[in-house]
Image (cartoon, helix red, strand yellow):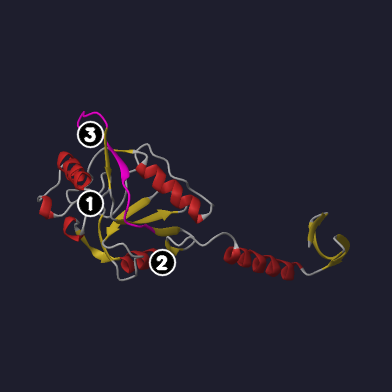
Amino acid sequence: MTFSQVNDECIVAHHDITDGKIGVGHPIDPTDAAQLVNTLVEKKRVVSGRIDSRIIFENDSHLVWYRQADTTNTSLWFRFDNYPSIEVCAKLPTLIFIRSKNASTTRVFACTGNQRPTPETKLYHAPLFNTGEQGAFCLGSATVPVGLMEATEMISGTENAIFDSVFTHTNQAHTFSKKHGDTITNKEHLTIWQDFAKRNERPKKADLTPMKHTLSDIINAMEK
């Protein structure tokens, strides 16, 4: 199918292909051509690329995926209150990420267990610096990929931006449960992670602060 400009009109033609050679064009109705293009685009959306098993939900504006609980250590860097940068190598619980495709907006939550989250999965505050009460992650100077791209590229780019950056502050007082104290300061947060690293353990349900939401609550809100 070719598109040709003749004066102020667009001529759409269909060409037969014989032995790899394009034949004479036969004009077709532009409306039919537009419908054909839309059909081809929809087919491409379905079959293009590899479906990433980490993806939980995706629409035109958001991508939701999970990062399975660590079996090996993740490097976490902290710098706050005029202390030099400190590295802690520890195991993270399962995390759920929500990204805006058209902006850098990023939200992070935690959940228990090591299985793929379901709509009924209860959410917990992510035990991370820079994360607000509703999961919003403060990126600071970190840059996450924005715009049209494969989901896998957005996932890796976002996770790399977060875990390659330096955590600088708590954005809320409940990064860990009240088992560790009524409010968690910067220093206490670091100490808790150092303790997990020393014991080679990751946070469990009792260590996390529950939220009032399930995963389906968050996804339903995005679809409205």
Q: Quadrant location of residue 56?
A: bottom left
Q: Amino acid at mark 2?
A: Glu
| In magenta segment, residue 78 | yes
In x, y percent, where is residue 223? 41, 66
Q: Nearer the viewer, mark 2 or mark 1?
A: 1
Residue topped by disc 2 = 223
Question: Contact, CB < 8 Å: mark 3 with mark 2?
Answer: no
Whether residue 18 is visible, yes or no, is: yes
Q: How many marks?
A: 3
Residue at 15% in and 46% down: 184
The percent coordinates of residue 37 (x first, y second) are 69, 65
Give the residue type at disc 3: Phe
Q: Which residues are magenta?
A: 66-85
| Percent x, y of residue 216 | 33, 69
Check the picture and name the quadrant holding the N terminus.
bottom right
Q: Which residue does the numbered mark 3 point to in the structure image?
A: 80
Q: Nearer the viewer, residue 35 or 59?
A: 59
Residue 189 lies in magenta, yes or no? no
